[in-house]
């Protein structure tokens, strides 16, 4: 069985795991006050080109989003996000649980447009009753999006501009950031992301660590007292070094970017296998998630040898399915999938 | 200047005010433990035909909605509402502030359809990732809606059925309930509302009291410990008798219904004045709010002698405006408006 | 029956009520955007000597505390308060419901000491694990306290100093502020309170209005966006002018201070009646609440003709009871009580 | 340097780590829907003797407490806990952040007494104003406590009885449960804990896993919808199998209990080393945390070769320090400490 269900099906990349194994019986201080964590923060500051950024390691994506957003917003503010955004849909109300509304924007294959952000804010303040409504206090985007699409450098720059003009922070959910950076279509670097976002996170869980996300605060005056906030959100790992060690390995010798490139390269091959066999590619995703419309009979046949998820409900005759590659996908898996598709 | 801005521009109906004045220097127990409150609860139980309903008086609508919804939902649940619903738009995030997401449904002139509710819930549980999403835990509707429209008895019955089938409570925001009951188009009674809703409130603020809303819990097992919940939400009035006295007056001798009828009768006259002068009635509202599209020049002219609000942003040439009547509107105000419109 | 249960048993002072009656059928804008509210704010700015203070009228004390504290604290912070403080005991967890811990200090007849505040903060930051604990983000005191005692000018000045040194706001709950100002023992003025507090409120409910509290923000940079915050907390009154009218009457011609003086003068007479009859005065309260230890038989006898509450549980032979006077207490009530006590 | 700072300084016990390494490149479903997690739950059901308990794995202790308590309480309720309890002190307000007050009880070396619980609840409901106060909705205890002490079977039974009588759940924080079970003084078993608690958790982080806590709900009707609640609290691990694998190893062949015994045995030796050298043992802890009063000069000398923390502030001449052993402490570490102490 070859598996394309998600990008969190394997453990850790061997180099990451090795960092844990190698140091396993060492005794160090907890909560991130250990040399491995300090070192990893330094590596991330260097890789992002932000020598004075605050870096904080958390365990998972939902808690990272909830903590950062809670810290960035005033009590009367909400967070702007695509209606397809992870925080709007798939976090069981974690944002609302800390008291904030998610203000949704239309999405275009998962992306929001700077003009829609500007329009929302302009309309908001033009409304005479705006003081009775939830004020847009920040913008959340994901890069790549939940649809696998990526914002171009120009799009990011425009979003940065509207946020700067409107004086709201730009926050980027980078759960799969490495897969965006590893895409052939990417015309931006990690430094660009760090420069254009006020706060963002570099995802580990889906990129080769066992778990862990690196929250990077480049605009430090916007998000203070991160430590107690992280603790309050239940997001502080006692054995903090486990996060430092893993991110240390990821940012050693370019591993993070290599893994991203690996997965997206295989994803593009996968996409073209389906396209060349005449199936409809539903979204032109340049990253590790691919969306294909297949006849239900084809799905049922393929599922005998490969695993992957529906994207939305099963249709009457055809359905959209999602194939996800990751750092752990092998070239052989793609070869095998190609064989299966050709045989259909 | 004749005024149609809103239905909370005057103080209280004279009979309501008189109840306060008459008893002003009496000394009674606080927090609703006084005979006037007990009496008013009894009157409401009688008027609603629910002899064992719990009745609780709160000060305002937003806090009534926030308190009731908070009490009805489990922590992981959200509240279904029209995207135009008051809780979704105009309560500054009060629902989210107590931790719950507002799950929005399409609206049809402010109303939701039973089939959309059913569809939302069916889709929700059909989604394999539903445990990562906010579960629909109750349905909120307003009667009349923010667009002045009303649900028919058949529509209410269908909403009740879908809620019963799906085992979620039906909550009705009755901020302007009297204006619905007073409408010529109303084919339902207060008893019907009480029978079909699990919890609802009878608005006072917009109906002739200085302030105050009567929360009625007909399905008592769904909403317990109301007293401390109300206190926690800062919604408990120290001099609780002020609420009891006002609702006592409102439910004495049919005053509540009379005031509703009065305002809607004038509103229909107002609507027909505009229609007969050739202006577009944007929404066929049978209650005390009327929505008319007028040329901006007409608006500017009318505003010299009458006050009313824009409904949405001012257009380039034409705009939609809202006229609101209330228990405090006089027949002369409408006559005067007629004169103004004819003169245009 | 003469009644000393609480200071919120009557309606409004006749001059206050008259302001409502006189204007009852006027039509004005909602939510405090009316001339009466604007005027009342001006009167309060003048009375407090803070010409640029922000003044906001809310309905009740619990919601005023919850709203102000929520606005003043960062997410990771809690509020310091006497363990006997209203927010710590009698608000059904309203502070916690908006996410903040009440950090309790020892109390001395309801008061906190500046040195205890300093000590708490010093110990907090001396603790190596302080980042895992809730940071003291502001100080809450009540003037007078729940025990009827008052802080002297020197004590207030010291509390102000420790707060200034530690850079946390000082917030004063003035639910009964007028009874403190009206006390013979008061060596401070309303202007002193306004100068020494960053934010405080002037209580109306217990002082002669039907309801309403005037929140005064003298240090405006600490508490912004008050309007949506108040709305979010369900504390915004639709017919806002009712608050403006009442506070306008209270701050017209010194009514507020006169009522305070009236009640405390009667309270001191009441206290001395008991003392001169040989009963123990439990707390030397200089304001409108008096605490006396009485044999249970005396309590039972008195209760045949007078109403008052236990302060804590009924003891085996003796119990502490509380007598409360207010603006609505008559001299005759005290005379009658004297007669009853003498007869015992 | 021998280290006794805490019990979360090392990585994972080799058998636990091996389970992760061995399976690292396997691909499994996320969020706990994998065979390893299912297996581990079964092992825990067996070990606790609760064949129908719900078992849920979370990442850390604070989030486990916050999630369970949030799920167990109604909105108007708070949680009873020792004033020294972890949730009352060291969780940065995580309980309050989800809206609930921690109601503190006096502690006796970290333990609460059943009679104090009963007394609190009795007093609460005897207070006429109880509806204005936060109702005690559950009892939280930690076993062992933050002072290393343990509740005896009799004490647990009494706490269970008072909770049953008062109809509130008993929740046990078992962050270090294995060290209690491994104590010579323990007269209870894991099955007893499971039988007497309604909900409890078996800590992994401090007991030999990299991270992870096993929440066990024996009284399932009290805590439903755990999955979305865990997700909402940001406590759901994407690669859920990491938790299943680790707990699978811990509950294989008695490893969990062996590790507990190992650490407490060494802790008792450590305690007796100090006692026999004439130092004061501050708390008679039978588990892995030991508290000794030492002259500051001794502390400074020892700290040249051993690490350990102050327990509270450093005194003028003497201070209390805490020594913590764990599954990772070696007998040689204790021998070395003995040598150091003898040499003093």
Image (tube, coloured by chain):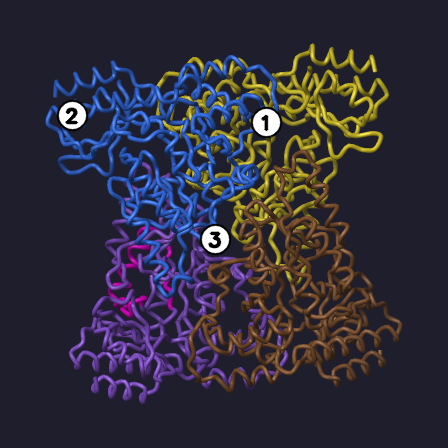
Chain colours: A brown, B yellow, C blue, D purple
Alpha-carbon span between mark 3 and mark 2 = 47 Å
Residue at x 28%, y 34% (from the top left corner): C150
Q: Which residue is mark 2?
A: C274
- CB under 8 Å between callouts 3 and 2? no
Residue range of the region highlighted in magenta in the rendering: D145-174
Disc 2 residue crowd, few under 14, some 14–19, many 20+, Cα 10 Å: many
Please tell me whether mark 2 sits on a helix, a strand or a loop: helix
Disc number for residue C33: 1
Alpha-carbon span between mark 1 and mark 2 = 49 Å
Placement of C99 over or under A52, stated as above or below: above
Alpha-carbon span between mark 1 and mark 3 = 35 Å
Write down the quadrant of residue D138 in the picture. bottom left
> Where residue B228 appears, x then y in whole percent?
41, 40
Disc number for residue D98: 3
**Near-viewer residue (B34 or D133):** D133
**Near-viewer residue (C319 or D337):** D337
> Where residue A220 appears, x then y in whole percent?
57, 60
Residue at x 31%, y 29% (from the top left corner): C180
């Amino acid at each position: 069985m070859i598996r394309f269900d998600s990008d969190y099906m394997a453990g850790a990349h061997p180099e990451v795991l090795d960092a844990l194994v190698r140091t396993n019986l060492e005794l160090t201080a907890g909560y991130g006050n250990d040399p491995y964590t300090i070192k990893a923060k330094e590596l991330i500051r260097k890789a992002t080109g932000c020598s004075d950024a605050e870096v904080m390691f958390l365990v998972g994506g939902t808690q990272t989003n909830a903590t950062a957003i809670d810290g960035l917003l005033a009590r009367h503010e909400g967070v702007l996000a695509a209606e397809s955004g992870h925080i709007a849909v798939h976090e069981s109300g974690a944002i609302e649980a800390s008291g904030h509304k998610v203000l949704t924007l239309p999405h275009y294959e998962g992306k929001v447009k700077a003009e829609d952000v500007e329009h929302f804010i302009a309309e908001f303040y033009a409304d005479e009753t705006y003081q009775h409504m939830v004020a847009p206090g920040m913008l959340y985007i994901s890069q790549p999006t939940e649809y696998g699409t990526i914002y171009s450098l120009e799009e990011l720059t425009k979003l940065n501009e509207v946020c700067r003009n409107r004086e709201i922070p730009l926050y980027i959910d980078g759960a799969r950031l490495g897969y965006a950076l590893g895409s052939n279509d990417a015309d931006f670097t990690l430094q660009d992301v760090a420069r254009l976002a006020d706060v963002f996170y570099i995802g580990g869980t889906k990129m080769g660590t066992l778990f862990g996300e690196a929250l990077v605060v480049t605009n430090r005056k916007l998000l203070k007292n991160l430590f107690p906030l992280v603790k309050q959100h239940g997001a502080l790992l006692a054995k903090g070094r486990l996060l430092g060690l893993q991110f240390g390995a990821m940012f050693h010798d370019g591993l993070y970017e290599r893994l991203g490139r690996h997965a997206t390269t295989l994803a593009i091959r996968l996409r073209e296998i389906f396209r060349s066999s005449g199936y409809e590619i539903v979204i032109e995703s340049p990253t590790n998630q691919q969306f294909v419309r297949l006849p239900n009979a084809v799905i049922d046949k393929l599922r005998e040898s490969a695993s992957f998820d529906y994207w939305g409900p099963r249709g009457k005759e055809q359905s959209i399915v999602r194939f996800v590659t990751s750092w752990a996908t092998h070239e052989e898996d793609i070869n095998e999938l190609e064989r299966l598709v050709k045989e259909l």
